[in-house]
Amino acid sequence: MEIRPYRAEDEDAVIQLWRDCRLVVPHNDPHKDIRRKQAMQADLLLVGIEDGRLVATLMAGYEGHRGWLNYLAVAPDRQRCGFGRQMVAEAEIRLRRMGCPKINLQVRRGNAGVVEFYRKLGYLEDDVVSMGKRLEKD
């Protein structure tokens, strides 16, 4: 699998992949999420390509204190092939180059399989309460 930054022509395939992986929720407009990411650290929206097909995505970011991982998706028919692990490893390399000392991520409650995936990659549960506030209604 080739990993590269997102390109505008990837948009439809990226959003379809996110839908296929049930990452699109009513309060997040995927088109807006992509536009927002393209305005900030655009090179950290990564896609994985296999035989010309977009099969994986990962959106990473770093704000000077912590790195973040979002929108990790692997096509359902390509899961358990190591693509998720490759995407996370590439994001970790890029964030480390930026001086990032720690990466955070959030997993929706009840998604035990994803929690276990990240545990196997060395991620641990932090003793924190995750909070958020919507500044814009999508």
Image (spheres, grey):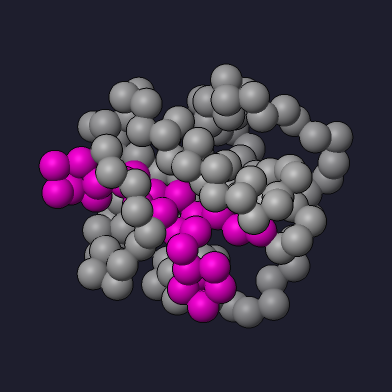
Q: Splitting the image into 4 quarters, where does residue 125 fall?
A: top right
Question: Image quarter for residue 126?
Answer: top right
Quadrant of image for the N terminus: top left
Q: Position of residue 114 (x, y in %)?
A: 53, 31
Which residue is painted at 40% across and 72% down in the image?
A: 31
Write the residue at 37% across / 26% down: 82
Part of the protein shown in magenta: 36-62
Q: Considering only vertical position in the picture, is 63 above or below 18? A: below
Q: Is residue 134 magenta?
A: no
Asked if residue 39 is positioned above or below residue 65 in the image, the reply reads below
Residue at the extreme left: 51
Residue 65 can be seen, yes or no: yes
Task: Return the x and y of residue 120 as percentages of the image width and height.
Answer: 57, 20
Residue occupying the point 29% across, 72% down: 8
Residue 128, located in which quarter of the rendered image? Answer: top right
Q: Could you tell me if residue 21 is visible in this image?
A: no
Is 54 contained in the magenta span? yes
Left or right: 22 in relation to 131: left
In the image, what residue occupies the spot 53% across and 25% down? 117
